[in-house]
Amino acid sequence: MEWAFRSDLPIYTQLAEKLTQAILSGAYPAGARLPAVRDLAAEAGVNPNTMQRAMTELEQQGLIYSQRTSGRFVTEDTAVIDGARRRLAKAQARAFWSGMARLGYDRQKALALLTEQDQTDEEVM
Amino acid sequence: MALLECKQLTKRYGSVTALDSVDLTVEPGRIVGLLGPNGSGKSTLIKIANGLLVPTSGTLTIGGSKPGTETKRIVSYLPERTYLSTWMNVVQLLDFFCDFYPDFDRNTAEHMLTALDISPKLRIKQMSKGTREKVQLILVMSRKAKLFLLDEPIGGVDPATRDYIIRTIISNYNEEASVVISTHLIADVESVLDDVIFINKGRVVLQSSVDEIRSEKNCSVDELFREVFRYAV
């Protein structure tokens, strides 16, 4: 996993985001056991307390749960994972529309561009 | 109880005031960055904590006691300059630390030396500046101490070694121990810090958690430091 941090957000927020993406991409599939906080912290080059805080965020969202003796696991409830996927996808979409608006594209023109791009991509392939 | 506590700590060298009424505490389980420009008083503070200097006024305590033989049992100190005899080789250094500190974990040290490709037969005088720094830090971090005081631990080493050292610091301290790192290489240590203390001209100008700085000021500690300590051109 690539661990690089932006300067304008707390590190734990960015860690939580990275871990969520790892779950969504299947790097940590449903039901999988997560590495220990300390090992993950060392890998990412961050403070263990910060990694702990990121884990707590994911626990609150129900994406992971901890079992007292055996560690932390990704939820087996795929609906929760799909919910997180949808939430992030919506955020991506919002960012796209506002980026296009800044370039002077209204929804219709932006949509047209998207469709056009899909077609040219297919042609290339 | 706070591991390290300063109350109105003041140190003067003749007419020069190095520390001016410093109040601060370091709680157990924290990694704290002591950050300030050159000559701000960082090393003076760390030297007082190790009993190498005595305060002009005010107090500094470690686990409630003044620096002395008892506190040295629980404090592992990396000075800014090497104090080790340069004729010693790595094995002799390991013996030396085993003799001196009951909490020294030889296996941990040997493991790290191997990881960094440092030969046990190498004498300090044969080592480059960077290798000397690595060896010293390995020795210091291999103690099971309560408080680690690291004065400029990453100044002279390359970025890859810097990463290794930072990971070493993370994986070697335990939850009841605290680490104080004095440095001006903020961007390199920022992601491992819980808290930062900005010190300038002997005064504490800011004490905050890294998360607080990032979420309230929307900038990194490195950026904030540049802003706080900006010189007029």
Image: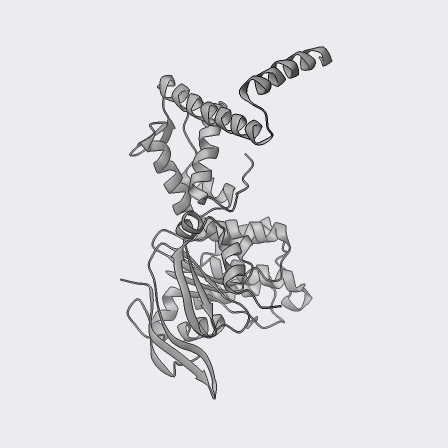
Vertical order, B122 against B165 (above or below):
below
Quarter containing the N terminus of chain B: bottom left
Vertical order, B182 against A11 (above or below):
below
Q: Position of residue B20 (x, y in %)?
A: 40, 77
Residue that lies at the very extreme toward the right in this rendered image: A124
Residue that lies at the very extreme toward the left in this rendered image: B1
Q: Nearer the viewer, residue B24 or B29?
A: B24
Q: Which residue is found at the position 45% from the left and 53% from the top?
A: B193
Q: Position of residue B18 (x, y in %)?
A: 46, 78
Q: Nearer the viewer, residue A72 or B88?
A: A72
Vertical order, B58 against B214 (above or below):
below
Quarter containing the C terminus of chain B: bottom right
Q: Position of residue A59 (x, y in %)?
A: 33, 32
Q: Which residue is found at the position 62% from the left and 71% from the top?
A: B86
Q: How is the image coloured?
A: one colour
Task: Work out whether residue A70 can be spotted.
Answer: no
Residue that lies at the very extreme toward the bottom in this rendered image: B14
Q: Position of residue A22 (x, y in %)?
A: 48, 28
Quarter occupied by residue B209: bottom left
Q: Nearer the viewer, residue B116 or B78?
A: B78
Task: Work out whether residue B211 can be spotted.
Answer: yes
Q: Which residue is found at the position 41% from the left and 68% from the top?
A: B204
Left or right of B111 on screen, residue A88: left
Left or right of B92 on screen, residue B4: left
Quarter occupied by residue A55: top left
